Image: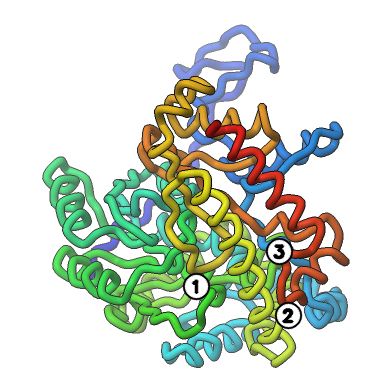
């Protein structure tokens, strides 16, 4: 049987007041500016911090190329705007698991993708990000993540009092042998490793793991009794819909949780809605109980009006299916164009396969970057691009990669335009890279890379 750690509740004894020390005796009243806090261990997420930096530069009138933040960069579809407005009267908290209409719609969404799902196995939350944290807390124990992997996995594990163990992998899936060695080594050191996270398709690389890699991971998960969390937020944005896609939920259904949402495929990041698909059987029932307990104390329930609009979205009416198809075309076109610019500058770049990410490796240019700009690692590379050229990107080390590799996560979707009119024009264009504002951004990137590399 899959192992879960028992949940514990902190004691309800009150903390000492500001008028007493921890022995109960009186002490001098502290100035509030010097109140005692524990150590600060988590800063603002690298992606959100980069977005705020770019906004500040833009407000000050400085030219910017905003390619750090992983936002989908498109306006909400009018059908969803209308659904949200009509649902404004949903002011009650509602069930922690989410409204029945949304859970049923999400269940059918997965069923249409070959994963028969009962609405009782669906839990909704204020974004899949919150659900991922809730799942880590519910499962307990440490987690294995791919190197590189999305910035928040390791941070969330730390917040939950756990350790994220990095295992070298590719396209969001740890290499099977590396996973086995990582789990064995961590357990030998006394760590209780209970889960592994995969990202299909991947952020930061914009690539998709082949089915063979997913099957190999599932074999290791079964051998070592690991719960698999499959983050599939980008599944609907695979550039070529005919690309083979394998989910662990089809291979190891009894031990796999799947999460997704609407922030990427329908560009609704600010609406904060996500769904989790729990497995059948004892594990799914136990995780549901624990996840609802966690949700009840942290987010209570997702926003009611957003749930109603999301229920419509997950039914996939033809207008929204068309919107996602146009989004795929746009993301693919601009991501390829950006990848081509980095390749021409001498970087090694995996071909983008999904979403709006490019992951260039400038290590082949290490000597010239050191000589020209005193760049010694990926952080100094990202800093030069930002402060000298106004180009916002994230260093690979933010995703767990080794800093010396000079890898960057480049997000392309904020190049689509500064207004909804420009973004919709890009969405509907068969050749978006020829539009003046996108062409200008690509030309500026080409110019920056030429100057950077000499």
Q: Is residue 251 above or below residue 288?
A: below
Q: CA distance from mark 2 to mark 1?
A: 17 Å
Q: Which residue is mark 3?
A: 433
User: What is the number of the mark on residue 67?
Assistant: none
Q: Is residue 62 above or below residue 76?
A: above
Q: Compare marks 3 and 2 and give the one earlier in the sequence.
A: 2
Near-viewer residue (306 or 352): 352
Residue 160 appears in the figure: no
Residue 116 appears in the figure: yes
Q: Position of residue 350 (x, y in %)?
A: 42, 58
Q: Position of residue 203 (x, y in %)?
A: 48, 58
Colour scheme shown: rainbow
User: At 29% across and 74% down in the image, what residue appears?
Assistant: 255
Q: Is residue 53 above or below residue 282?
A: above
Q: Which residue is mark 1?
A: 276
Q: Is residue 143 above or below residue 263?
A: above
User: What is the number of the mark on residue 308?
Assistant: 2
Q: Quadrant of residue 23?
A: top left
Near-viewer residue (136 or 114): 114
Quarter of the image for the C terminus: give it.
Answer: top right
Q: Position of residue 447 (x, y in %)?
A: 66, 41
Quarter of the image for the N terminus: give it.
Answer: bottom left
Label 3: how many Cα within 10 Å (few below 14, some 14–19, many 20+): many
Which residue is farthest top? 28
Q: CA distance from mark 3 to mark 2?
A: 35 Å
Q: Are marks 2 and 1 in contact (CB under 8 Å)?
A: no
């Amino acid at each position: 049987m899959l192992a879960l750690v028992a949940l514990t509740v902190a004691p309800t004894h009150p903390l000492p007041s500001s008028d007493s020390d921890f022995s109960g005796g009186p002490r001098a009243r502290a100035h509030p500016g010097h109140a005692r806090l524990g150590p600060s261990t988590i800063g603002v997420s690298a992606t959100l911090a980069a977005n705020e930096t770019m906004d500040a530069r833009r407000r000050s009138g400085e030219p910017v190329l905003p390619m750090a933040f992983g936002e989908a960069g498109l306006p909400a579809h009018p059908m969803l705007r209308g659904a949200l407005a009509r649902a404004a009267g949903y002011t009650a908290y509602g069930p922690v698991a989410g409204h029945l209409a949304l859970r049923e719609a999400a269940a059918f969404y997965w069923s249409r993708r070959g994963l028969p799902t009962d609405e009782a196995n669906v839990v909704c939350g204020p974004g899949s990000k919150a659900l991922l944290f809730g799942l880590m807390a519910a499962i307990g124990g440490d987690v294995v993540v791919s190197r590189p992997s999305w910035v928040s996995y390791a941070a969330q594990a730390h917040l939950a009092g756990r350790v994220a163990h990095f295992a070298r992998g590719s396209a969001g899936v740890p290499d099977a042998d590396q996973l086995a060695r990582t789990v064995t080594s961590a357990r030998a050191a006394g760590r209780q490793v209970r889960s592994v996270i995969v990202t299909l398709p991947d952020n930061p690389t914009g690539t998709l793991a082949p089915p063979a890699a997913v099957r190999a991971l599932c074999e290791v998960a079964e051998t070592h009794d690991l719960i698999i969390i499959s983050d599939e937020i980008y599944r609907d944005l695979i550039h070529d819909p005919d690309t083979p896609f394998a989910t662990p939920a089809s291979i190891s259904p009894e031990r796999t949780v799947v999460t997704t949402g609407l922030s990427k495929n329908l560009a609704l990041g600010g609406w904060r809605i996500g769904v989790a698909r729990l497995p059948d059987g004892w594990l799914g029932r136990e995780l549901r109980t624990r996840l609802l307990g966690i949700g009840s104390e942290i987010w209570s329930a997702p926003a009611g009006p957003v749930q109603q609009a999301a229920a419509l979205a997950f039914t996939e009416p033809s207008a929204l299916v068309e919107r996602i198809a146009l989004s795929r075309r746009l993301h693919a076109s601009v991501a390829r164009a950006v990848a081509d610019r980095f390749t021409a500058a001498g970087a090694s770049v995996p071909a983008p396969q999904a979403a709006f990410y490019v992951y260039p490796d400038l290590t082949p240019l290490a000597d010239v970057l050191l000589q020209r700009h005193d760049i010694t690692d990926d952080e100094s590379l990202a800093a030069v691009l930002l402060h000298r050229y106004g180009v916002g990107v994230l260093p690979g080390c933010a995703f767990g990669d080794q800093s010396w590799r000079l890898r960057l996560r480049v997000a392309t979707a904020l190049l689509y335009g500064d207004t909804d009119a420009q973004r919709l024009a890009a969405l509907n264009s068969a050749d978006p890279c020829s539009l003046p504002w996108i062409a200008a951004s690509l030309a500026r990137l080409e110019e920056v890379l030429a100057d950077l590399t000499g």
